[in-house]
Image: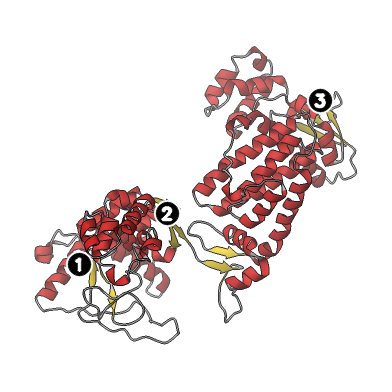
């Protein structure tokens, strides 16, 4: 194998250390996971290397021919920066996470859970597999004493793995004398054991315990728990193990959200380098809502979130601009409906589909992008297209935009909501779900055509240096080209497309031109929506002219460069002079 890997990696001499290191890692990896012990290995012959390694180790230790030596993976330093000496602790207590039946239940729980993002599910399965006996105690420090051996303290990663259950009734049992909080009480509340009479005899107020039991039953299991990605390999997986050990399946965790760490301007925070920002400092400088939106826009999923100072400095002005617009335009505008109003409603409710999904998946950066920046971009286009907005449409949009922002900047949105005349809190309002009936795909495609046409005109002016031009002639595709597209729409085989299209007498009349156009349609996937491009351009002519600074002529007889011939559906020919 060593010869083969060296040949494969073109290792020509022993001095190429980098290639040799890669080769060593590859051969060790493949040998360990796929290799088998050969016939010279006695009773281990035929055994997988991965399994044989543990078996040989076990046999040698049992025969007193080997012993275990512990070595840390690296230098151990305390949080106070004091170098630490590793000590082997005698009579240590372990939790047997290596138990195979226990692992099977944990895997079952992981498979049923919802993860945000789902990519971490694989990592949880991996951790469940490799976890073995875990040292769960230490001899000093803050923490809970081990109930059956109080000289030990439960170490922090092993502690507090089912404290979410305690949250549900802590406010009630605070009234009970701590000395009376025995295991029996928790057996009654958490496990449902029928021991209320016995507890009453001990002077414990059973009505409080009954209420605590109802609270636990109502709130548990927890729907989601959010924590850092560094705890997947221990604390969060312990949480799963301990829940499946203690509770019936209906009380197992339903979901975890795992997030990354926080960077500052794409750098790891470091007080020594001056790259740091305390939360209280950020709150004093920016306020809670700006801090919230900056942090949520900084990243999502397991990616590290970036505190962007430039974003934080500028977002307050954008939010204030929205507040001003809302107050000035709420319940104001024209009453007659225009085509562009349908487009605006369509694009807003299309965005709401994505925003709702983003919130449900806890993808807050996406929710902000789709639910604020994209919606504001659509609003600007809408106002450019119609000058004065439609009263009902703009009022509904102001409500939608404010509601969509509420989970991110709640205090700011509460103020707007009140200023708009609402008496109830916006935090108590219902979520605004997308109305599919208001989404008109044809209208969306028509407006996209107009936007693309404007972009093409501006690009031609820029590239051809036609800043002093006065007129733009726009030529829509000839009818026979639309017929070709109708006949071959969706086709991927050029031969089949040729056969289908050439069945039309109209298409055959264009001979060589058609034989060149049909393969182009298939190869470039030219399948635009069927719209009357001439009518669309005529309707939007004044707006297009205003945007590009040119007089617009549509399908004029004047065609000095024969641009009509190059026009294809979805991409009109353009001549500027």
Residue 53: numbered disc: 1
Determine the secondary structure under disc 1: helix
Q: Earlier in the sequence, mark 1 or mark 2?
A: 1
Q: Residue at x 58, y 62 (%)?
A: 295
Q: Earlier in the sequence, mark 3 or mark 2?
A: 2
- Mark 1 or 2: in front is 2
Task: List x then y, in percent, for residue 213.
Answer: 32, 54
Mark 1 burial class by Cα count in 10 Å: few <14, some 14-19, many 20+: some
> Horizontal placement of 229 versus 109: left or right?
right
Question: Which of 560 and 315 lies nearest the eye of the viewer?
Answer: 315
Q: Find the distance from the CA under tag 3 to the CA under tag 2.
A: 60 Å
Mark 2 burial class by Cα count in 10 Å: few <14, some 14-19, many 20+: some
> Horizontal placement of 147 versus 22: left or right?
left
Pointers 3 and 2 in contact (C-beta within 8 Å): no
Q: Which residue is mark 3?
A: 555
Quarter of the image for the N terminus: give it: bottom left
Residue 74, picture quadrant = bottom left
Q: Earlier in the sequence, mark 3 or mark 1?
A: 1
Question: Which of 82 and 212 lies nearest the eye of the viewer?
Answer: 212
Task: List x then y, in percent, for residue 88.
Answer: 25, 82
Q: Residue at x 9, y 64 (%)?
A: 43
Determine the secondary structure under disc 3: loop
Which residue, as the protein is rendered here, is positioned at the far top?
Answer: 505
Residue 224: numbered disc: 2
> Horizontal placement of 446 versus 33: left or right?
right
Q: Find the distance from the CA under tag 1 to the CA under tag 2.
A: 40 Å
Pointers 1 and 2 in contact (C-beta within 8 Å): no
Question: Which of 208 and 416 lies nearest the eye of the viewer?
Answer: 208
Q: Find the distance from the CA under tag 3 to the CA under tag 1.
A: 80 Å
């Amino acid at each position: 194998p060593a010869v083969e890997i060296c040949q494969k990696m073109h290792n020509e001499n022993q001095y190429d250390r980098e290639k040799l290191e890669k080769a060593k890692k590859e051969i060790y990896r493949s040998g360990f996971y796929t290799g088998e012990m050969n016939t010279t290995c006695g009773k281990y012959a035929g055994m997988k290397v991965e399994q044989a390694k543990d078996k040989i180790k076990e046999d040698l230790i049992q025969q007193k021919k080997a012993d275990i030596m512990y070595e840390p993976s690296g230098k151990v330093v305390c949080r106070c920066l004091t170098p630490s000496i590793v000590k082997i602790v005698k009579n240590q207590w372990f939790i047997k996470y290596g138990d195979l039946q226990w692992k099977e239940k944990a895997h079952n729980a992981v498979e049923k859970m919802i993860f945000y993002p789902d990519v971490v599910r694989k990592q949880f399965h991996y951790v469940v597999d490799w976890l073995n006996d875990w040292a769960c105690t230490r001899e000093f420090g803050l923490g809970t004493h081990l109930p059956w051996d109080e000289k030990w303290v439960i170490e922090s990663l092993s502690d507090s793995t089912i404290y979410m259950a305690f949250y549900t009734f802590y406010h009630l049992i605070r009234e009970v004398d701590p000395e009376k909080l025995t295991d029996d009480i928790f057996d009654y509340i958490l496990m449902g054991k029928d021991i209320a009479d016995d507890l009453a005899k001990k002077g414990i107020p059973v009505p409080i315990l009954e209420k605590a039991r109802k609270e636990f039953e109502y709130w548990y299991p927890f729907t989601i728990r959010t924590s850092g990605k560094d705890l997947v390999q221990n604390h969060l997986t312990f949480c799963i193990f301990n829940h499946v050990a203690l509770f019936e399946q209906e009380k197992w965790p339903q979901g975890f959200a795992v997030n990354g760490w926080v960077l500052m301007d794409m750098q790891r925070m470091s007080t020594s380098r001056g790259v740091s920002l305390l939360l209280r400092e950020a709150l004093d400088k920016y306020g809670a809502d700006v801090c919230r939106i900056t942090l949520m826009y900084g990243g999502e999923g397991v990616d590290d979130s970036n505190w962007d100072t430039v974003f934080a400095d500028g977002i307050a002005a954008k939010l204030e601009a929205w507040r001003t617009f809302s107050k000035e335009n709420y319940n104001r505008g024209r009453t007659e409906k225009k085509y562009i109003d349908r487009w605006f409603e369509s694009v807003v409710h299309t965005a709401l589909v994505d925003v709702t999904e983003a919130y449900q998946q806890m993808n807050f950066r996406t929710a902000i992008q789709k639910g604020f920046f994209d919606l504001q971009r659509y609003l600007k286009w809408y106002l450019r297209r119609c000058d004065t907005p439609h009263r009902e449409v703009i009022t509904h949009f102001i409500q939608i935009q404010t509601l969509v922002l509420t989970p991110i900047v709640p205090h700011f949105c509460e103020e707007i909501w009140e200023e708009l005349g609402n008496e109830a809190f916006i935090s108590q309002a219902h979520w605004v779900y997308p109305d599919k009936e208001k989404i008109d795909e044809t209208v969306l495609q028509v407006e996209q055509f107009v936007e693309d046409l404007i972009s093409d005109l501006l690009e031609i002016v820029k590239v051809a240096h036609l800043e002093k031009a006065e007129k733009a002639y726009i030529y829509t595709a000839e009818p026979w080209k639309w017929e070709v597209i109708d006949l071959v729409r969706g086709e991927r085989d050029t031969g089949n497309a040729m056969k289908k299209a050439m069945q039309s007498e109209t298409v055959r009349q264009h001979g060589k031109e058609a034989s060149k156009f049909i393969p182009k349609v298939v190869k470039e996937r030219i399948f635009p929506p069927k719209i009357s491009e001439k009518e669309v351009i005529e309707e939007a002519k004044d707006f297009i002219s205003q945007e590009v600074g040119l007089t617009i002529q549509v399908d004029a007889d004047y065609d000095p460069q024969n641009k009509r011939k190059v026009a294809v559906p979805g991409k009109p020919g353009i001549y500027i002079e």
